Image (cartoon, rainbow, N blue to C red):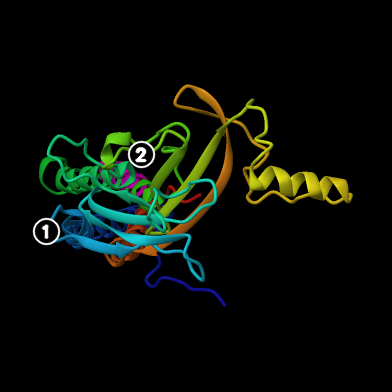
Amino acid sequence: MSTALYPPISTEERIQKEEESLVRELEWLLQSLQETLASIRAGLEECVALLEPTEPGSTLVLSSQRSETIKGFVTRVGSRIVKGDIHVKLPSLPPPRGASSYRLLLSSSPDAPPFVLNQLSTARNLINQSLDIVDVSTWTGDAKNANFISGQLRLLFDYIQEAKLELKGLTTQGNWWDDPIDERVFDPPLPSNVAFHLSVSDAALELSLRTLDPAHAPPDTFSGFSLRDRLASAIGATRKPDHDEAEEEFQYRGKAVKVKEKVRVQSQDPSLLAIMAKLSALEHNVAVSRKSLDIVMGNED
């Protein structure tokens, strides 16, 4: 089946008409993209509002399932943890005399250093920069320049994607051994043999608590762990590592250490889940807009 024009026109005239049609289509698309950008701006502003340091914040339970190893809570206001009370029961972290667990209490002193979740600070900065890109695309730059808008959409997509990766915990920043928490965040200060690492993973707060030993220290022949190991060795059995970092060595606060015990708990944060959902939708909208503009501009891969 074929299509013919009547009355027939020359090839040159047909090409000219096609080019004129593409110009009109591009003008229409650029105009409609301004409406899309306005919608994206509204979504980004909602994300910023959810990350604002608004009292009373979000109080989240941090407790291990089916055990009493960790029981407690933290309160997040914006990107800061402002309250926290966590009780820990680990053989390698004996409680003070008369207590049934070791208590990690966030200091309420005005002189205490702030407890900041860097992933949330970074995500908020990326979202604010995304808003700047939208404003430039709408008000400052040439909204009728297809190449300019295409570049802005590409930049906007990258920033939104990076913000989402921060909330998913897929960035390289914040390894527990590279970024130790200030001991003075707690009252009393955090013991030197404890690594407390609170991060964001899949829009949830994730606490990883580790007790540490010097990497090259002689074994404690009087500890319950050592006696158990010796008995296992005597009968030809091998004690399995308690966690996935048992055989690794880390540089922590300038010292070589090994992880003796490790426990991890998560608490879903409704606000972060909402931000993640909004960013995913915005990422999709920007991707569709980029694809449409590339097709009309003839830049389709």
Disc 1: which residue: 55
Q: Main SS type for the magenta part?
A: helix
Left or right, 229 with reference to 102 = right
Report helix, strand or loop for mark 1: loop
Q: Which label was assigned to residue 172?
A: none
Q: Is residue 151 magenta?
A: yes
Q: Nearer the viewer, residue 289 or 12?
A: 289
Q: Residue shown at 40%/33% (left/top)? A: 179
| CB atoms of marks 1 and 2 within 8 Å | no
Image quadrant assignment for residue 222: top right
Counting residues from the start of the chain, the first of labels 1 and 2 encountered is 1
Q: Nearer the viewer, residue 151 or 186?
A: 186
Which stretch appears magenta? 148-159
Q: Residue shown at 51%/49% (left/top)? A: 301
The relative height of residue 233 versus residue 278 in the rendered view (above or below) is above
* Residue type, label 2: Leu
Residue 97 image point, x, y percent: 39, 49
Judge whether residue 197 can be spotted in this image. yes
Disc 2: which residue: 190
